[in-house]
Amino acid sequence: MGRGARAADVRTIAADYAALLAAGRMDEAAMKYWHDDVATFEAVPGEHGETHGKAETLAKAEWWFANHEVHGFRSEGPFVNGDSFLIVIDLDVTPAGGVRTHMREIVGYRVAGDKVVEERYYY
């Protein structure tokens, strides 16, 4: 999935990615930085527990937003280490047919070249 990323490159990518998320521009961050073969791993198994490829990962994101009403969003970070960075996300959200709740998750991103090749969700 490309060459390894240098720390300075990762810092630049991480800062821009985090700024796009904070501005509510998740789709733009995905299109700009996700590798065509990006892989995502949720903390719990299930239908969307693991995705591979930009199209499948975008479909998972579209499903999530179609099935959740987001009332508020806040992010912290990025926190960079080597070829990876973390972003902490706080969500005020109501799942379809569910109860409004607060979600806090940490998302780990691994970079190769100038693209995010892996996302891991921790909650």
Image (cartoon, rainbow, N blue to C red):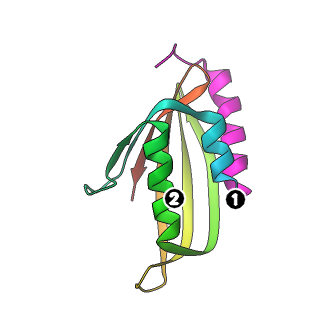
Tell me which residue sits at (71%, 30%) in the image.
Answer: 12
Mark number displayed over residue 62: 2
- Amino acid on which disc 1 is placed: Gly
- Amino acid on which disc 2 is placed: Glu
Work out which residue is located at the far top of the displayed protein and give it: 3
**How many residues crowd mark 2 within 10 Å: few (<14), some (14–19), many (20+)?**
few
Question: Residue tagged by mark 1?
Answer: 24
Query: Are the two marked residues, 1 and 2, in contact with CB atoms closer than 8 angstroms?
Result: no
Name the magenta segment's main secondary structure: helix
The answer to whether 29 is drawn above or below residue 69 in the figure is above
Q: Quadrant of the C terminus?
A: bottom left
Magenta extent? 1-24
Q: In front of the other: label 1 or label 2?
A: 2
Left or right of 104 on screen, residue 7: right
- Magenta span contains residue 82: no
Left or right of 64 on screen, residue 21: right
Work out which residue is located at the far left of the displayed protein and give it: 45
**How many residues crowd mark 1 within 10 Å: few (<14), some (14–19), many (20+)?**
few
